[in-house]
Image: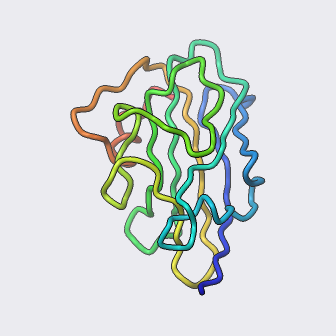
Amino acid sequence: MRDIVAAAGLAVAAATATMQLQSSDFSPGGAIPIRTMASDCGGVNRSPALSWSGAPKGVKSFALILHDADAPIAGGFYHWVVYNLPAGSQRLAAGATLSADQLGETSAGKPGYYGPCPPPGPAHHYTFTLYALDLARISSETPPTGPELERRIAGHV
């Protein structure tokens, strides 16, 4: 069995410094619980519970990205790409069920949540970034990848 150590960080991207992103499943800089890890790492691939507050006035939607910059692939690994969360949203429940027009493609090549599964070695750092957007909706014929979504929301945070 592999010894898995992963640190999780929470970040926000908004026009105000008062927006807060939290999880009841782990603390900032803490270990990600096994249940949120990918099934190929002994987890159950369940997305963590997240909540946020302090959204800026005028927000029209939210986007969320879970990224591992320590992954041994160019650009890091995108574990969760979420968009079109309504402006009034303040949380995602653990194991959140989202619609097809809210889920981008992970670096594993499929839309949805793909939990962390770091290779043996130094701890990886997973960053959950919540974006408050001035866009009501992002239309896409195919699920955008993490980098595609980041390009699309540039200038709208």
Horizontal arrangement in the rendering, residue 148 relative to residue 49 (left or right): left
**Percent position of residue 46, x then y:** 56, 53
Res 127 → quadrant: bottom right
Horizontal arrangement in the rendering, residue 35 relative to residue 65 (left or right): right
Give the residue furthest to the left.
141
At x 63%, y 49%, the residue is 48
Res 81 → quadrant: top left
At x 51%, y 65%, the residue is 38
Relative to residue 44, is residue 146 depicted above or below?
Answer: above
Res 76 → quadrant: bottom left
- Say which of 99 and 16 sits in front: 99
At x 51%, y 79%, the residue is 119
**Percent position of residue 52, x then y:** 69, 32
Relative to residue 52, is residue 40 depicted above or below?
Answer: below
Horizontal arrangement in the rendering, residue 72 relative to residue 68 (left or right): left
Relative to residue 46, is residue 133 depicted above or below?
Answer: above
**Percent position of residue 20, x then y:** 73, 35
Q: Classify the position of the N terminus by image quarter.
A: bottom right
- Say which of 156 and 27 sits in front: 27
- Say which of 23 and 53 sits in front: 23
Give the residue furthest to the top.
58
Relative to residue 123, is residue 94 depicted above or below?
Answer: above
